[in-house]
């Protein structure tokens, strides 16, 4: 699986966000209800969820590559927001206007 240079689509990003939130150990009952609603809202959500949750079965090298791609995406987004003056840093806090 080579993901270098590939941009993640918003549905895949949402699936990753759900995976992180649900595996954090602090997901509430409302979070689980919202996840179920998101999952059932669109067949593409179910496909993205199966793909992302299936990555947990992948070799570590594949996960590291995917993580590096996600890190690049997040960093490029942060730089873009900073250049667009959509980010403020004040007293060790960062506020992003999306």
Image (cartoon, rainbow, N blue to C red):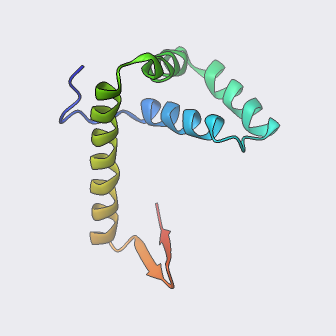
The structure residue drawn at horizontal position 55% and vertical position 16%, both measured from the top left corner, is 46
Residue at horizontal 39 percent and vertical 70 percent from the top: 86
Q: Is residue 31 left or right of residue 88?
A: right
Q: Position of residue 61 (x, y in %)?
A: 28, 27
Q: Residue furthest right?
A: 29
Residue at the location (27% across, 48% down)?
72
Relative to residue 88, is residue 8 drawn left or right? Answer: left
* Residue 2 placement (x, y as % from top left): 20, 24
Question: Looking at the image, is 78 positioned above or below residue 69?
Answer: below
User: Which quadrant would residue 57 be assigned to in this image?
Assistant: top left
Image coords of residue 83 (percent x, y): 27, 70
Q: Nearer the viewer, residue 24 or 87?
A: 24
Residue 30 occupies quadrant: top right
Image check: 1 left or right of 57?
A: left
- Please determine whether, in this image, residue 48 is positioned above or below residue 70: above
Quadrant for residue 26, please give it: top right
Vertical arrangement, residue 57 with respect to residue 6, above or below: above
Q: Nearer the viewer, residue 24 or 97?
A: 24
Q: Position of residue 37 (x, y in %)?
A: 70, 26
Given the current orientation, which residue lies at the most extreme bottom position?
A: 91
Quarter of the image with the N terminus is: top left
Count numbered badges in the picture. 0
Q: Residue furthest front?
A: 60
């Amino acid at each position: 699986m080579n993901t270098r240079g590939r941009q993640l689509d918003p549905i895949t990003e949402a699936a990753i966000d759900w995976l992180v939130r649900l595996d954090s150990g602090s997901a509430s009952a409302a979070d689980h209800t919202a996840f179920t609603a998101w999952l059932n809202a669109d067949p593409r959500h179910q496909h993205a969820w199966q793909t992302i949750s299936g990555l947990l079965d992948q070799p570590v090298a594949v996960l590291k590559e995917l993580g590096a791609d996600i890190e690049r995406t997040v960093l490029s987004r942060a730089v873009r927001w900073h250049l667009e003056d959509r980010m403020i840093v004040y007293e060790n806090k960062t506020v992003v206007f999306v």
